[in-house]
Image (tube, grey):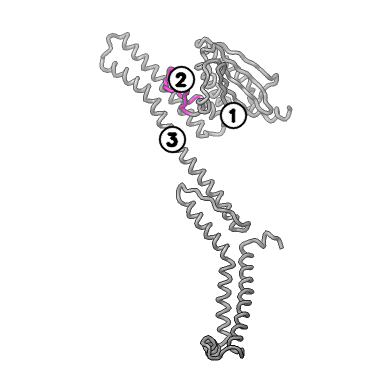
Amino acid sequence: MNAKYISTIRWKFIWAFLLSMVSGAAVLMAGYQLVNFMVYSNSAPPSAPYTRILRWIINHIGSGPLMAVAGIVSFLIFFFIFTRKVISYLEEITAGIQQITKLGESHRIEVRTADELGVLAENINVMSERLQHSLMEERAAVQAKNDLITGVSHDLRTPLTSILGFLEVIEQDRCRDELEMRYYVDIAYQKTLVLRKLIDDLFEYTRVSGGGPPLVLERLDLKAFVRQLAEEAVPELNLAGMTYTVHDQTNETLWIEAAPYELVRAYENLITNAIRYGKSGKKLEISFAREKDEAVVRISNFGDMIAEKDLPHIFERFYRAERSRSQHTGGSGLGLAIAKGIVDRHHGTISAQSDTYRTDFITRFPLCREQKESA
């Protein structure tokens, strides 16, 4: 018989039952021989109290009922002994389940056997780990929501306070002349644009991080796509006093599956970020490469270095290496988070490197299947 089936709970109870019967029968036979010796043996003193008691029981109750009672009692005792480990393990599993059901409490049950109880304990451990993971995700989601509300409140309040202040001056007729009033209106208008940009970024981040509708993918020439975005950024580059160069490390076209309208936002954010923080370097560099089955695009600026302690956090929402959260020295703090969310939705990766010479933002996307197979 297969050892797997012999080690099941059913067979353990069958073996316990059989062993209890055999052990009980052995005890019963030994007891029967002992009673015979004590009652009917010539060496047994007839006047002994236990002899008189045993003879009275045999004469008035009978040896049959006496053996039946003794057999049942001995069987139950042995059955409890032989099943003690199984019952103890079952009680341990039950106690573990009760502990796991307490909110936020983690517990692991030791897997001692290969039978159904061992499988049950293992499944309970898996369930406990998943429950803990779910609780951690729930706590992280609550914390993320609180952080999002805090960040949004801070960034919305700043331009809104300025707008209200300038409009209050105008509404109370405290302007000296029309020129001053137009100056205040212009500032309020600029702050309103900042506010709209922040709200647009917030909606975009919420849409990207929440998954959004399924992407409509199409075959896309990544090189031509990024080159076109770079050309469209030339006016912004000129205003910043910058130029851009392209370095192509591969002669082949990099075909990927992507949703162009989504990917536009990601690369626009990366280029805008490079312009904002790379003005002092006067140059934006874009390079293309193929590494195994991935298309790699590197967008580099030669401005100030990103501190090593800030580098792991720059793709987090509302995170700015510049601590003042000033709209003049930094954006909404959502641009890179949006870019990462879009890249992630395309099953790509995005990373950053920075030293005293240059800062690189590197995106990687899986190539189209046809291009992988033709390699």
Whether 323 is among the magenta residues is: yes
| Residue 177 against residue 288 in the figure, above or below | above
User: What's the residue type where badge 2 is placed?
Assistant: Gly
Q: Residue 293: give x, y in percent of width and height.
A: 68, 28
**In the picture, residue 152 is in which quadrant?**
top left
Residue that badge 1 annotates: 349
Quote the CA–CA distance across marks 3 and 2: 23 Å
**Residue at (47%, 24%) from the top-left corner?**
320
Give the residue at x 39% y 19%. 191
Q: Indicate the amino acid at tag 1.
A: Thr
Kind of residue sitting beneath label 3 = Lys
Q: CA distance from mark 3 to mark 1?
A: 24 Å
Task: Classify 188 as above or below 23.
Answer: above
Residue 354 % position (x, y): 56, 21
Q: Circles 3 and 2: CB distance less than 8 Å?
A: no
Disc 3 on helix, strand or loop?
helix
Q: Find numbered disc 1 in the image and state the secondary structure of the residue it sits on.
A: strand
Where is 43 relative to 115, above or below? below
Which residue bears the numbered disc 2? 330
Name the foreground residue: 91 vs 294: 91
Mark linked to residue 145: 3
| Mark 1 Cα shell of 10 Å, populated few (<14), some (14-19), many (≥20) | some
Is residue 344 rendered to the left or right of residue 145?
right
The image quadrant where one finds the C terminus is: top right
Please state which of residues 229 and 122 is positioned toward the viewer in this rendering. Answer: 122
Question: Percent x, y for residue 257?
Answer: 63, 28
Gap between marks 2 and 1 measured at Cα: 24 Å
State which region is magenta.
Answer: 317-335
Residue 312 appears in the rendering: yes
Image check: 368 left or right of 156?
right
Residue that sits furthest to the right in the current view: 374
